[in-house]
Amino acid sequence: MEVKDIKIKSMKTEDFKDNEYLQQYIEELQKDGLNIATEKLDDLINWGRSNSVWPFTFATSCCGIEFMCVAAARHDFARFGWEVTRNSPRQADVIFVSGTITYKMAPVLKRLYDQMAEPKYVIAVGGCSISGGPFKESYHVVNGVDKIIPVDVYIPGCPPRPEAMLYGMMQLQRKIKLENFFKLPKKPNISNGQTEGGNK
Amino acid sequence: MDNMQKYIQTLAPKAQFEEGGQYLTTTIEPDALRKVATGLKEKGFDYLMCLTGMDYKESLGVIYHISSSNPKEKETVIVLKTSTTNREEPAIPTVSDIWEIATYYEREAYDFYGIIFVNHPDMRRLFLREDWVGFPFRKDYVVNDEINPVPTKVPDPDDYEAVPSYSLNKEGKLVKKTKSLFENKDYIVNIGPQHPSTHGVLHLRTKLEGEIIKHIDPHFGYIHRGIEKMCESMTYPQMLYLTERLDYLCGTMNRHGLCMCIEKAAGIEVPARAQYIRTIFDELTRIASHLIGWACMCNDMGSITAFIYGMRDREKIMDIYEETAGGRLMVNYYVVGGVAQDIHPNFVNRVKEFIPYMRKMIEEYHTLFTHNPIAAGRMKDCGFLTKEQAVALGVTGPSGRASGWSCDVRKIAPYAAYDKVKFDEMLHQGGGTFDRYMIRLEEIEQSLRIIEQLIDNIPEGDCRAKVPAIIKLPAGEYYQRVENARGDFGVYINSTGDKNPYRVKFRSPCLSLVTALDPMCTEQKIADLIMISGSLDYVIPCIDR
Ligand code: SF4
């Protein structure tokens, strides 16, 4: 399977960055060989899954407001099938870590993540959750949520624009479309430079 | 002010007065503190604006900014200072029984500096976890991840409950007593730290009897980022970026406060054009913030449509920002001496289009939600805060004005172009949830009125004064108040003449709002808690800093 097979409505594969990462991801997935029967089924299931990702309402600070904007009228992520924000981690598929994670919050975030049902995804939104952002020097800020939980997509910005968030969501959709549903939650763990994915 | 000086002198003969400061500033011995504080309160100084912990290296101290809620003595601020040289067991008498909000402020000073307030009923940390080692704001504190690693476990609920308090025995030694906040039979519900309607990561430990709330114990610090401490190692222009991330909904206003404080200290004259632009931006931000406040409150009450409406109209303001400043939420537009660049040629037209649009929308909001009998019926009879409580807890801004306290800094101590415009300070007397709901929508109209008066009269000229490349503030202390969308926001800078400040403190209006939850919600139904907190419209990162 080639990357160009991953279809996202009205977006071409060349429009996306990080295609090499997904290529690697595919190769890693195909290492153990593929079962033709489940592959077709995978496609169908993943098509459904990637178009109905339910985010968890989680926001600690400023980036959360932009997350609200993405949910609201103008940007409206309902177009992508993401509109059902869940207030309980047990019903959510993806957690947008939008905002700074402090030492006091870190175990809470970990617990919330543990409570989510598999398959689950994490999007790190904004400088703070990627690396500590403007508060890197602080004594009470975790320098990147990937120290606590595995991250699938990073959306840089302080805060990222709503458009950037939509782009990040589409990237996650592409990733979901590649997965072997029947082998989940096992995901390959590859790293190319800054990008890392999979369950650790 | 002279007679206040004499008055303090009679109360504390050893009091020392500072010359030439912004406010009447006096340093007193800790022993005389309670006497002076009680005396000041009797003279009408009933509003403890700000309490700042300090580390003077050889001593630890506290600074009190005290003001009055009485309109006649509006601008009057008195600064009290006290300190102790004992760094091992620094003890200062509490004033929490004189000004109620000090209960929380003193816990903050304890958390950051380890200053023990004698006879304070509840000497827990306010922000950091109970197992945190050391006091991070002390100048000799060393950041060490081995001593304070990222915790892996959520604390046991019992850990929240042991409440220490300190008193002095006959020999003058500190004695620690511990009591439990709740009893074993109490039914406690944890709301937060992750709750979609706490407007951030706030943790409320709520004691219930059936569905009636008996007590609320708020826990902060889940988003404590140590901004004030970080400021101490930054230059002044660098600090500006952090202020917008305090209370991101009032970003420009917070930044305005810091800019003005620096400008005042450095003696920089801001051009009139910049003053006007800043005022317009501040008011646009106020509208955007009130829109989110309104939208989220309605959302909390179950009306998702209203949320979508509010966010839709807020996007119009975001567009205006974006054209001129480039940013949406973080506008990053104000700089020391003015604004970063001139306004976009479209700016004036865009704003002029926005004003009638917004007026129409407010009518729509009223038709859709305010006049909805179910919504109004729910809001009308709950969550009352009296004016006395509001003053004692320092609840300012729209919530304070809904209780009848005239506390608008734009009127009390006008800044920027506020003295050139006519607008009404909206006051309600009821102090209920509905009053707070209404006052936000009314304030949007007033903000539109302000913008309308300014937009055609923006003077020509520079939009930025010349400022030195490296800004050094003369040694001294500076305090600046601004009215942000949640109340009285204050910036305190203590400079030693260097290019970094010695101490920076931001007075957050939101802390008072959360502390007011306990008196407002006691004996109310738990289902109303979310609505009442929605009507207060607090932003947690502003509290935690
Ligand atoms: S990345 Fe920037 S906008 Fe986002 S939470 Fe951090 S400071 Fe706020």
Image (cartoon, coloured by chain):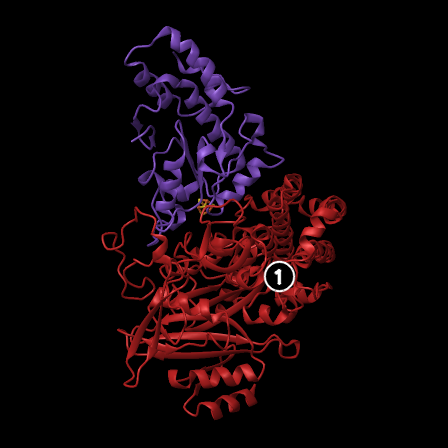
Chain colours: A purple, B red
Residue named by callout 1:
B399
Residue at 60 percent of width and 76 percent of height: B75
Residue B270 visible within the image = no
Residue B137: percent from left, percent from top: 34, 64
Image height check: is B383 above or below A124?
below
Residue at 34 percent of width and 34 percent of height: A150
Residue at the limit of the structure toward the left, as seen here: B146
Residue at 35 percent of width and 53 percent of height: A138
Residue at 46 percent of width and 19 percent of height: A14
Residue B110: percent from left, percent from top: 36, 68
Q: Secondary structure at mark 1?
A: helix
Residue at the limit of the structure toward the front, as seen here: B185
* Some atom of ligand 1 lies within 8 Å of the CB belonging to the residue at label 1: no
Taking the image as shown, residue B371 lies to the left or right of residue A127, namely: right
- Is the C terminus of chain B in the top left, top right, bottom left or bottom right quadrant? bottom left
Amino acid on which disc 1 is placed: Ser
Residue B45 visible within the image = yes
Please rate how many residues cluster around mark 1, counting C-alpha atoms within 10 Å: few if below 14, some from 14 to 19, many from 20: many
Taking the image as shown, residue A127 lies to the left or right of residue B303, namely: left
- Is the N terminus of chain B in the top left, top right, bottom left or bottom right quadrant? bottom right
